[in-house]
Each structure stands twice: as C-alpha cells, then as structure tokens.
Image: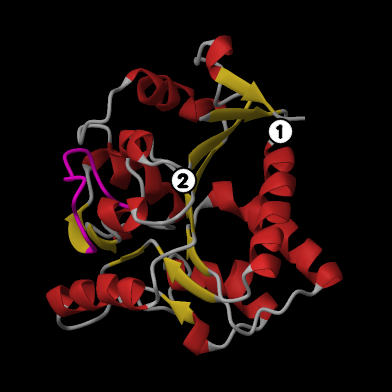
Amino acid sequence: MFFIFPTPAAIAEHLSQHLIRLIRNNPDSKLGLATGSTMEPVYARLLQHLEKERPDLSRLTTFNLDEYIGLPASHPQSYSYYMHQHLFDPLGLDDSQINLPNGMCTNLDHECRNYSAAIAAAGGLDFQLLGIGTNGHIGFNEPGTPFDSLTHVIELSENTRLDNSRFFDNPADMPTHAITMGIKDILDAKEVVLVVTGEHKADVMNLLYRSPANPSMPASSLKLHPNARIYLDQAAASRIPAEALYHVE
C-alpha cells in the first residue's frame, strides 16, 4: 500500500504516465482531483506529457474534492482558481467537463446533495487523487467524519486553518468552513492514489501506518479500499518501517 519514490518529481512522473494510460484506455474517464502544493508538480508534469502525446480529452470529466465556503471562483485562494490556473485552462477543458463545489451557493444542503448525485449519475469516479492534512484529513473530511459520509459542509479544524492560513496574505481571511466530498464518495472510486511529500508529513504518515481504519484518522479509511495506493517521497516515508515500503525507482 505504501510506495516510496526517490523524489516528488519521480512521483509526478509515475503518476502522470499512469493518468495518461488511464485516459487513453478509457476516454470517458471520470477523474476526482485534488489541490494543494503537493499536486503542483503532478499537474505540471501531466501537462508536459499531454502536450506531447495529445490523447483525446473531449470526453473526460472531472470532479474536485472540495472548495472553501465564501470564496468566489475568482479569489486566488479558491480551489476553482487553482484548478483553472494549474490544469483546466492549459488543457482547454470545456466548462461542461468540470465539476467543482460552489462555495458561494445560497443553498448549501442542495449543493451537497447535488454534487454527490452528479458523481453517481456519471457512473462514479474511475480515479481519485488525494492529499493529506497533518491531522489526517482527506478532502476536508476532518477527524471524526463518518466513513459513510457523502458531500457535506465541514467546519475546518483549528489545525487545518493554521496549516492553510499561510496561503492567505491576511491569515484572518482563511475561511472557517468548506464543502467537501464525503469519505464514501472517495471510497466509491475504482482507484485511489494518495500523494504525500515532505518531512512535515512524516509524523502523520507514521500515525496512518499504525492506525486501524477509524474515523479519528480519516485517511485510514483507505485501508478499506481494494485498490488504494499511497505514494510517498523519502522524507514523508522516513518514519514508516522499511519493510512496509515498496520501492519505486
């Protein structure tokens, strides 16, 4: 389950090649996508390969994990802005191919129900990309989130707000709530890959390795998935026993 790579660049290369194969084999792929600094080298490398190989992307559909409540899509820290900057606009995807939670909607319950329903109506996700928070959250599913949860509104923990406020010019502007895919939405994907890089994630990865599947550690839900893999660089894997790691060159 735990795959160690020499560098974040090696993870980006391996994962981008895997995604291209997935799209080539199934042009109607439904991809669940994540944001954050961990994903930037992945998307950058994917774009480089796509410019050369040019598979048909016209039937591709994407669903993003989450979005802050109260940030318009034009805000530089919204996840809509991130995705358009790092992937959607360079690929030239049509708006009809893109699904993101609307953090500015007037009816949050309706938005959440419709988002999970849209994933189900699309036939579910073929692939889900994930990052992890230092408290073990996936998406914005904070510790204690039930494993059977669908898309919902979450109050962000103090830990998450502290971690993410560094991206805001004024930390006080960090939102307090978000819309996130639920853990069930994630686990229903046919394939899940969690990408973890950096020494600052070593402690949470040690906890994940040692934790049974328990809502107190949301990422531990991946231990219940038949096709979930965790890709780590050497720094993030430094506290996991060597015998638990599969080395990828």
What x and y, as percent, mark residue 133? 38, 40
Q: Nearer the viewer, residue 78 or 152?
A: 152
With 214 as the anchor, is 197 left or right in this view? right
What span is in magenta?
139-151
Outermost residue toward the right? 52
Q: Is residue 140 magenta?
A: yes
- What is the distance, in whole Å, between disc 1 and disc 2 at their CAs? 16 Å
Label number found at residue 131? 2
Name the residue at 86% across, 69% down.
Answer: 52
Q: Is residue 149 visible?
A: yes
Please, is residue 243 above or below residue 122 in the view? above
Disc 1, SS: loop
Mark 2 nearby-residue class (10 Å; few <14, some 14–19, many ≥20): many
What x and y, as percent, mark residue 120? 31, 72
Q: Earlier in the sequence, mark 1 or mark 2?
A: 1
Amino acid type indicated by mark 2: Gly
Label number found at residue 7? 1
What x and y, as percent, mark residue 66? 35, 62
Q: Nearer the viewer, residue 62 or 155?
A: 62
Name the residue at 50% across, 16% down.
Answer: 240
User: Which quadrant of the figure has residue 27?
Assistant: bottom right
Give the main secondary structure, helix, strand or loop, of the magenta stretch.
loop
Q: Is residue 198 magenta?
A: no
**Quarter the C terminus occupies:** top right
Please, is residue 143 above or below residue 122 in the view? above
Mark 1 nearby-residue class (10 Å; few <14, some 14–19, many ≥20): some
Label number found at residue 56? none
User: Which quadrant of the figure has residue 109?
Assistant: bottom left
What x and y, as percent, mark residue 56? 71, 79
With 78 as the anchor, is 149 left or right in this view? left
Amino acid type indicated by mark 1: Thr
Q: Nearer the viewer, residue 161 or 136?
A: 136
